């Protein structure tokens, strides 16, 4: 497969996944703010932190309030990580590889992009937000479901699978890192129930609440949630499941890929820790290591399978 085609498919999958993840984050946070007592709600800054876009958000002088954060994450053209920007990038990558992908995948992605473009202003309002976000989530899932049901299992499929699961693994660590910090004051009488609400929101951010209750426990607790989201091999958004999926597709492409060593290192790191009993400081350090591992894995994939980035010309 041509390196440029492989790169475009990889980023197409990452951008579609990113749009869905961002939509789910905004929707869950909107409901969490409504469900918590006035004055102690978590606010909107955590969403900017989770997406890793704090520098871009604060580059403009604006308050970190609901209106500004929602606009930034949903439809800000200057934010490369907004839902609209992600769909624009996904559409462009898909356009260049239309001959490799099922024709219907281009049609569905184009429909989702047009919906986002035409309805973004409605999505910024409280009354229209849920409908907008639900359609982004459903549309992204339709695209992934379509690719999963009809796409030939060749290298194109493997690069799409790698991109989708690497993006998921990254988002899982980001959500846990930010949301696992104490969102509510410890001296509140209702702090235990609020902690439970906090961890429910973490699970819902990854569509894992129902699965957790059916397969782990009815009661939601910090340790069980961390174990579920890091180590469960059967939940599609757990870190272990995502990394295993990436490893399987890398092996299909190249049994002697240098990226295999990065996968092995991440699995070894996961196996060494008991996340359920980690302090918050240790958990943060552990997640930092995982994120560095994800970055290293992406860099190896890029240097091995994608075309080199064009060199910048030096100014006179």
Image (cartoon, helix red, strand yellow):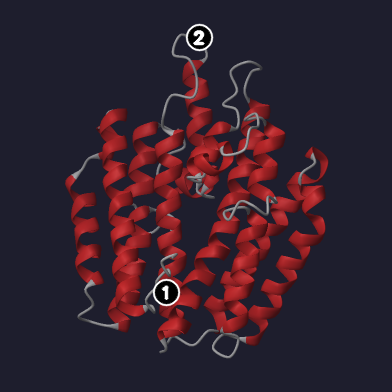
Local SS, label 2? loop
Mark 1 secondary-structure assignment: loop
Point out which mark residue 84 bears.
none
Q: Is residue 233 shown to the viewer in this render?
A: no
Q: Which residue is mark 2?
A: 189
Quadrant containing the N terminus in the rendered view: bottom left
Residue at image position (70%, 51%) is 75
Q: Residues within 10 Å of mark 2 (few under 14, many from 20)?
A: few
Left or right of residue 289, residue 222 in this image: right
Q: Residue 184: x and y, percent?
A: 50, 20
Residue plotted at (64% across, 55% down):
83
Q: Is residue 223 left or right of residue 237?
A: left
Residue 157, x across and y down, in percent: 46, 80
* Disc 2/disc 1 C-alpha distance (Å): 58 Å
Frontmost of labels 2 and 1 is: 1
Residue labelled with disc 1: 310
Q: Considering only order in the chain, which callout, 1 or 2, is on the residue closer to the N terminus?
A: 2
Position of residue 62 measured from the top left corner of the image (x, y, whole percent): 65, 32
Query: Along the horizontal axis of the image, is 286 left or right of 121?
Result: left
The answer to which image quadrant residue 124 occupies is top right
């Amino acid at each position: 497969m041509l390196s440029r085609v492989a790169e475009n498919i990889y980023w197409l999958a990452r951008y579609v996944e990113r749009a869905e993840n961002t939509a789910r984050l905004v929707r869950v946070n909107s409901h969490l703010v409504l469900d918590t007592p006035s004055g102690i709600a978590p606010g909107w800054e955590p969403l900017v932190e989770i997406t890793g876009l704090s520098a871009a958000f604060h580059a403009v002088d604006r308050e970190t309030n609901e209106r500004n954060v929602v606009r930034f994450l949903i439809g800000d053209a200057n934010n490369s990580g907004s839902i609209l920007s992600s769909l624009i990038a996904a559409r462009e990558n898909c356009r260049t590889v239309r001959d490799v992908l099922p024709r219907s995948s281009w049609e569905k992605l184009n429909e989702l992009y047009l919906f986002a473009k035409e309805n973004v202003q409605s999505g910024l309002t409280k009354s229209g937000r849920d409908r907008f976000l639900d359609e982004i989530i459903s549309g992204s899932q339709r695209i992934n479901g379509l690719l999963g049901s009809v796409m030939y299992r060749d290298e194109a499929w493997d690069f799409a699978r790698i991109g989708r699961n690497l993006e998921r693994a990254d988002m899982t660590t980001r959500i846990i890192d930010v949301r696992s910090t104490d969102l509510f004051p410890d001296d509140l009488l209702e702090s235990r129930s609020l902690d439970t609400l906090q961890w429910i929101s973490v699970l819902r951010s990854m569509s894992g609440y129902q699965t957790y209750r059916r397969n782990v426990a009815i009661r939601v607790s910090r340790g069980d949630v961390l174990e579920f989201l890091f180590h469960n091999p059967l939940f599609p958004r757990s870190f272990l499941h995502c990394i295993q999926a990436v490893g399987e597709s890398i092996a299909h492409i190249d049994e002697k890929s240098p990226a295999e060593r990065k996968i092995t290192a991440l699995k070894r790191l996961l196996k060494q820790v008991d996340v359920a009993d980690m302090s918050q400081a240790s958990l943060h350090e552990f997640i930092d290591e995982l994120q560095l591992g994800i970055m290293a894995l992406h860099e190896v994939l890029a240097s091995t399978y994608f075309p080199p980035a064009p060199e910048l010309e030096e100014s006179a």
